[in-house]
Each structure stands twice: as C-alpha cells, then as structure tokens.
Amino acid sequence: MAGKKRTRTGEVKPSNATQQPQTTTETTPPCAQPQSAANKSTATTHSDQNTTLEGKRATGPPNPTPSKSKSKPKQPHTQQLRQKLPKLPPNTTISRRPLLRPSLPTPFSSSASPKVLYITSSTPFVPALKRIRKLLAEIQQRGKQSQRKKHSGLKSREVEKGIVDELARKKGGAEGEKVYVKATGRAIPKALGLGVEFQGEEGCVVRVEMGSVRAVDDVGVVGKEGDDGDEEDIPETRIRNVSSVTVSIGLE
C-alpha cells in the first residue's frame, strides 16, 4: 500500500478522489433576484411562439392562384338602342321610294322661303359650289335693296340709328337669310366638303346639324307564291332610319 500524506501535525491529508467536484451553477449576484417559476414559463412560451413564427416565415403561406373572371365588355348605349329590321325571305325584292321633299323655291324669291339645295351621291361638286355662290349673291343683293328702301327719304338721325341697330344685330349673332345644303346617306361627305369650302372664306358663317329621317321601302315577292300564311308574314312596306346632315351657309 502506498503511504498516505500527512500534515505536520500528523493528520492524514484528504485524497483527490474524495474531494467533491465543483458545481458549475452560477450564483446570482447580490443585486439581482432569482427568476420565479411564472417568469420562466412565460419566457418559454415566447420562445416557442418565436420559433413557430420563424418556421412559418421560412415556409411561407401558399401563393393564392388569382381567379380569372371573364367579364364581358359592356356595349355602348347607342348600340343597345339600334334595332335591326327583320330578315326577309330570299324570294323578295326591295324598291326604295324617294324621300319626301317640298318644292324648291326660285333663287329670286323673298327671304320668307328658305333656299334649300339637296345633294346626292351623283351630284357634281363644282356646279353645286357655283349654285350656292349664286344663291348667296342674290341674298346679298336683296339685303342691299332693303337697306336702300329703309334709308331713302330719312333724316340723318334715323340713318345713324339704323346703322347702330345693324351693328348690334351683327354683334349679337342674329340670324339672317341662309342657304341650306341637305344630304343623306352616302352624300353626307360631299355636303360637308361644300361647307368646309365656304368655311375658309371671309364673311361666311357655316353651321352643321346632324339628324335622321325615315324612309319607306316597298317589298315585293318574286317567283312562286307560297301558302297564304307565308304571304301574310311578308310586309308590303318597311320603314328605316337614314342619317342626314344639314349645312347652313350664311353671310355675316
């Protein structure tokens, strides 16, 4: 047996195996208080929540697929109001009647009768332009004659008053005698071209009005006649709407 180490007094020194191991528990400083059981439980719950949130962020929610909704474009209000005429059977023919128009006055008639010029798709452009110029010249000549009759035999005060009234009438935009150019369907571009021609000239006032007129068409049956019931379904006449334009040309 190995000898034991002793002190100077003769006491046996304790061996290393018998020494107690040092504890690694941290002692709380005197200024701090030890954590309670409730605080420890809340700390653990917060740490668990943080870990779950981090896991959700890592994985991320599934991307929702956008729902493709097929929305039909809304038709404009004008297209909804249009109504197509019913379709006719193939053994029918349509003959168009001419539009109802009043009788045209002569170029030398008074201002009470409006000067109207109807334009068709086959109307030549230059002769129509010359005819409008001729009507405007007659209107200007009638205006000068009326002014002479008014001022003949008048005093200077009455003449000055007439001049002032005429200037006020022009400044206020009072309407005088005009030439009306009317067209329908395919002749509308030609009527607008005549208005543009006079719009570039000095001393002319041009206005455009759009509208529509009703036209009557006759329906005829060609070929073999069917039963009585089929003949009743086919109308004798049809009414259709035609777009029209009125170009008024006057002098200032």
Image: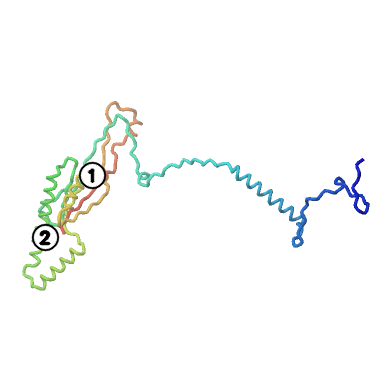
Task: Tell me which amino acid carries mark 1.
Answer: Thr
Residue 63: % across, % down: 55, 42
Helix, strand or loop for disc 1: strand
Within the image, what quadrant is residue 190 found in? top left
Residue 31: % across, % down: 75, 62
Q: Residues within 10 Å of mark 1 (few under 14, many from 20)?
A: many
Q: Which numbered dot is residue 64?
A: none
Residue 233 or 33: which is nearer the viewer? 33
Residue 150: % across, % down: 10, 66
> Is residue 232 shown above or below 158?
above
212 left or right of 147 in image: right
Q: Which numbered dot is residue 143?
A: 2
Q: Residue at x 34, y 37 (%)?
A: 86
Q: Where the N terminus falls, by quadrant? A: top right
Q: Where the C terminus falls, by quadrant? A: bottom left
Within the image, what quadrant is residue 225 found in? top left
The way the protein has been coloured in the rendering is rainbow
91 left or right of 201 in image: right
Looking at the rendered structure, the number of numbered marks drawn on it comes to 2
Residue 231 or 90: which is nearer the viewer? 90
Task: Tell me which amino acid carries mark 2.
Answer: Gly
CA–CA distance between discs 1 and 2?
31 Å
Q: Residue at x 62, y 45 (%)?
A: 56
Residue 235 or 136: which is nearer the viewer? 136
Within the image, what quadrant is residue 145 found in? bottom left
Residue 237 or 209: which is nearer the viewer? 209
162 left or right of 212 in image: left
Q: Which residue is mark 1?
A: 184
